[in-house]
Amino acid sequence: MKKIGLVVKEISEKQIKTTLKDSGNFFIIKYSGLSSPDITSLRQSLKTSRANLFVVKNSVARRALKDSGLEAMVKAVEGPCGMIFVKDMPVEASKILCTFSKDHENLKLEGGFLEDRILEKKDIEAMAKLPSKDVLRAQVVMALNAPISKLVIVLNQNLRKIVVCLDQIKQKKEKVK
């Protein structure tokens, strides 16, 4: 019969591996010095972006990362670490993390992984500065709409010039009578 600690570690490792396969995006943070209410508020904030904070033993996290082919991320797992798994909105999660780390100095961004790319702290901070999907979509629509709007304005001005010209001809003919 296995010890309960080994069973918990095996379950945790299996859960990390399956979550890594499902989401593919994650961040690693160091939370040493944060209070339990602070971590709870971070978890609640992350839920709005469909992200989950998972605190696990470092040995389990290292083993899961190695088995998943992410050996380069193993060096970021030192001290009290947490893994934040993100499914759909990594930009939103990075914004939440950066805002939270500015408010709580004890939270440190260590790195992350985003669709086959290893992220450093500066990459996460740069990603946090990106506009949201809705803003980007609006910018694309405006960029596509701008040439059409300008064409309509130009064509409208030509029609206006013709109307003004015809009006002036009409006024001249009325004066001649």
Image (cartoon, rainbow, N blue to C red):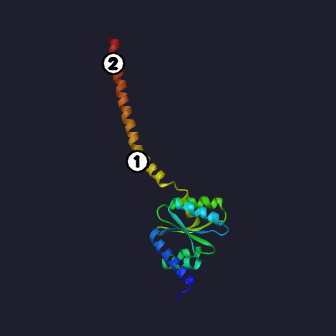
Q: Residue furthest bottom?
A: 1
Is residue 142 in view from this perspective?
yes
Mark 1 neighbour density, 10 Å: few (under 14) some (14–19) many (20 or more): few
| Quadrant of the image occupied by residue 128 | bottom right
Q: Which label belongs to residue 144?
A: 1
* SS category of the residue bearing label 2: helix
Q: Give, as a three-letter code, the residue at label 1.
A: Leu
State if disc 1 and disc 2 touch (CB < 8 Å). no
Out of 166 and 134, give the one closest to the viewer: 134
Spatial CA span between label 2 and label 1: 40 Å
Q: Which label belongs to residue 170?
A: 2
Q: Residue furthest front?
A: 1
| Quadrant of the image occupied by residue 160 | top left
Position of residue 156 measured from the top left corner of the image (x, y, whole percent): 37, 33
Residue at 50% across, 54% down: 132
Task: Tell me the mark number nearer the camera, choosing from 2 and 1.
Answer: 1
Out of 51 and 105, give the one closest to the viewer: 51
Tell me the quarter of the image containing the C terminus.
top left
Q: Is residue 101 above or below residue 148?
A: below
Position of residue 166 measured from the top left corner of the image (x, y, whole percent): 33, 23
Count of numbered tags:
2
Residue at 38% across, 42% down: 148
Position of residue 164 measured from the top left corner of the image (x, y, whole percent): 37, 25
Q: Give, as a three-letter code, the residue at label 2.
A: Lys
